[in-house]
């Protein structure tokens, strides 16, 4: 299982996946708003979304686990 950790704190602007979705490496999973900039997070590998631990509009912190992907 791959855990996607946040590299910085910010606000969750948009979530583009949900549990059960199949993703390819490079697909955008969600977008954070950090200091008025949009920061997209991509899937590092292909797999299935096992869990999404963040919600749109939520304020998140660095190193928080956002999404889990299984192969």
Image (cartoon, grey):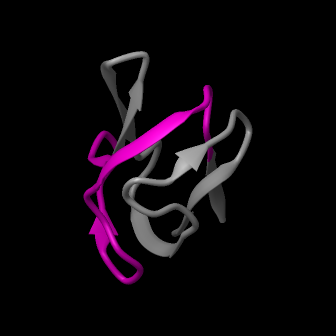
Q: Is residue 60 magenta?
A: no
Q: Which quadrant of the structure image shows residue 32? A: top left
Task: Judge by depth and name the residue closer to the eye, 66 or 20.
Answer: 66
Is 41 on the left-hand or right-hand side of 7? left
Location of the N terminus by quadrant is bottom right
Q: Farthest residue toward the bottom?
A: 20
Q: Which quadrant of the structure image shows residue 16? A: bottom left
**Which residue is pictured at 58% across the width and 66% down the height?**
53
Q: In this view, does 66 lie above or below 31?
A: below
Q: Is residue 12 magenta?
A: yes
**Which residue is pictured at 61% across the width and 26% down the height?**
8
Task: Judge by depth and name the residue closer to the eye, 47 or 4.
Answer: 4
Is 23 on the left-hand or right-hand side of 70? left
Task: Judge by depth and name the residue closer to the eye, 47 or 13.
Answer: 13
Is 39 on the left-hand or right-hand side of 68? left
Is 48 on the left-hand or right-hand side of 5? left
The tally of labels here is 0
Q: Farthest residue toward the right?
A: 63
x and y, in percent, of residue 4 in the image: 59, 48
Q: In this view, does 36 lie above or below 18?
A: above
x and y, in percent, of residue 66 in the image: 57, 55
Q: In this view, does 21 lie above or below 56?
A: below
**Which residue is pictured at 61% across the width and 38% down the height?**
6
Q: In this view, does 19 lie above or below 7?
A: below
The span shown in magenta is: 5-30
x and y, in percent, of residue 18 in the image: 35, 74
**Which residue is pictured at 39% across the width and 57% down the height?**
46
x and y, in percent, of residue 51 in the image: 54, 74
């Amino acid at each position: 299982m791959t855990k996607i950790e946040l590299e910085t704190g910010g606000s969750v602007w948009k979530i583009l996946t949900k549990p059960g979705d199949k993703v390819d490496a490079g697909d955008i999973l969600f977008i954070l708003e950090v200091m008025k900039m949009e920061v997209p997070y991509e899937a590092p590998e292909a797999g299935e979304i096992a869990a999404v631990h963040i919600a749109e509009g939520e304020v998140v912190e660095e190193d928080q686990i956002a999404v889990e992907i299984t192969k």
